[in-house]
Amino acid sequence: MTVQEFIFWFFAAILVFAALRVITARNPVHAALFLVLAFCTSAGLWIQLEAEFLGIALVLVYVGAVMVLFLFVVMMLDINLARLREGFWGYLPVGATVALLLVAEMALVLAGPYFGLSEAPRPSALPAGHSNTKELGRLLYTDYVYPFELAAVILLVAIVAAIALTLRRRKHGSKHMDPAKQVAVRSKDRVRIVSMPPVKKPNGGGD
């Protein structure tokens, strides 16, 4: 076994273990941390496959931003674990059926004549001046430009829908200012001079 094969099997074993712990860990925080470990090992495998940009993007975007947000949300929500475990055995047959179907589909894909392991040889060595990022950008904006733009539109619609669903207008108790009224105000509306009669103090005091 060569060094590259050892590194591959090492990362692959850690990835499978972390993925299993994501769905079997009882604590949501531990599950999120195992998902971070799975992302890091996946990035290592991508870098070994000479996809450096994808590996670095996975670490920076998902591990550095998305998963940190997940951890903050999970830790702040104070999730009731007892309620999460309710109905587990009732959904187990459906989950097991879906899992078996996924395993069967992956086995058919790997054992098939077109997508089997024999049809995926080791990638050839790239030249010294090859840019992984440049090649990925060229494919995205030439061959896959329409799917890329369609995905961007779908994500934009999802963002707008999420904002619309979470927007709540309070009818009472909210204090806000109208910018139009603030701009249209006049100087005489800000200060009002009131003429008041003098008030005499009791016991013969002065004004």
Image: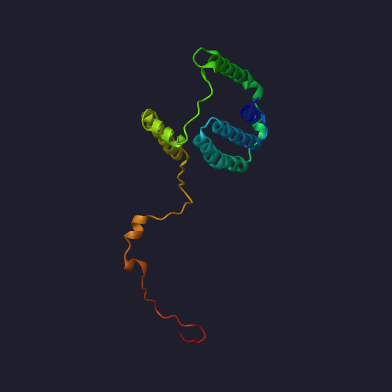
Q: Nearer the viewer, residue 167 or 69?
A: 69
Q: Quadrant of residue 194?
A: bottom left
Q: Is residue 163 left or right of residue 88?
A: left
Furthest toward the top, the residue is: 113
Where does the image place residue 79, in percent across and percent down from the top left? 63, 38
Q: Residue at x 53, y 41 (%)?
A: 60
Where does the image place residue 170, in percent across and percent down from the top left? 47, 46
Where does the image place residue 28, in percent across and percent down from the top left? 64, 35
From what the image shows, is residue 200 above or below residue 147?
below
- State the count of labels: 0
From what the image shows, is residue 85 above or below residue 183?
above
For the C terminus, the quadrant is bottom left
Q: Residue at x 41, y 35 (%)?
A: 137
Where does the image place residue 84, in percent across and percent down from the top left? 64, 31
Q: Is residue 87 left or right of residue 194?
A: right
Q: Nearer the viewer, residue 74 or 126?
A: 126
Q: Residue at x 43, y 39 (%)?
A: 164
From what the image shows, is residue 99 above or below residue 56?
above
**Colour scheme of this structure image?**
rainbow
Q: Nearer the viewer, residue 82 or 48?
A: 48
For the N terminus, the quadrant is top right
Q: Residue at x 36, y 67 (%)?
A: 190
